Amino acid sequence: MATEAPPPSGGDSAVDTAVPTTEAYREVQASAEFGELRRSYRSFAFPLTVAFIVWYLLYVLLSIYAGGFMGTKLVGNINVALVLGIAQFVTTFLIAWYYSRHAAAVLDPKGEAIKSRMEADA
């Protein structure tokens, strides 16, 4: 679907943003502030990713090799496999919610500080 509006022109806008140079990006990348932002992200994302992959593979392996256990009925026609399968979805949504809170509280302020400093220097 195409739009009829023309693209914004470079000099007509009320707010002119300067584009930082390549050197400015390299300076920020080498800064301790950016390193701390990356550390904050990695220390959150990597452990949760590993934990979720292990949890998912456990579910798959149990489904393959422990069919009797997975077929154990808990209540009526609800068995262990169904409960663990639904728990996979719940876990996914909880991780996404937890990450959004972490990003808003920790990552976004650090990133915004770096962005503001770059825009002020440009």
Image: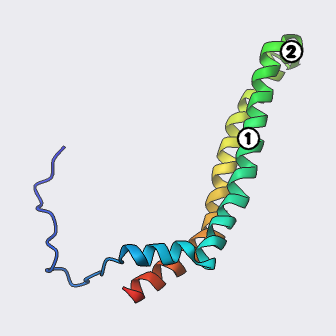
Mark identifier at residue 16: none
Is 82 or 25 nearer to us in this picture? 25
Q: Which element carries disc 1, helix, strand or loop?
A: helix
Q: Is residue 96 above or below residue 64?
A: below
Q: Mark 2 packing: few (<14 Cα in 10 Å), some, or many (20+)?
A: few
Percent of width and height locating residue 40: 68, 66
Q: State the residue lying farthest toward the bottom.
A: 120
Vertical placement of residue 77 versus 19, above or below = above
In the rendered image, the quadrant that contains the N terminus is top left
Check the picture and name the quadrant holding the C terminus: bottom left
The residue that label 1 is drawn on is 52
The answer to which of 41 and 20 lies nearer the viewer is: 20
Q: In the figure, is residue 46 to the left or right of 25?
A: right
- Residue depicted at x 59% and y 73%: 34
Amino acid beneath label 2: Ala
| Residue 105 visible somewhere in the drawing | no
Q: Which residue is mark 2?
A: 66
Q: Residue at x 63, y 65 (%)?
A: 38
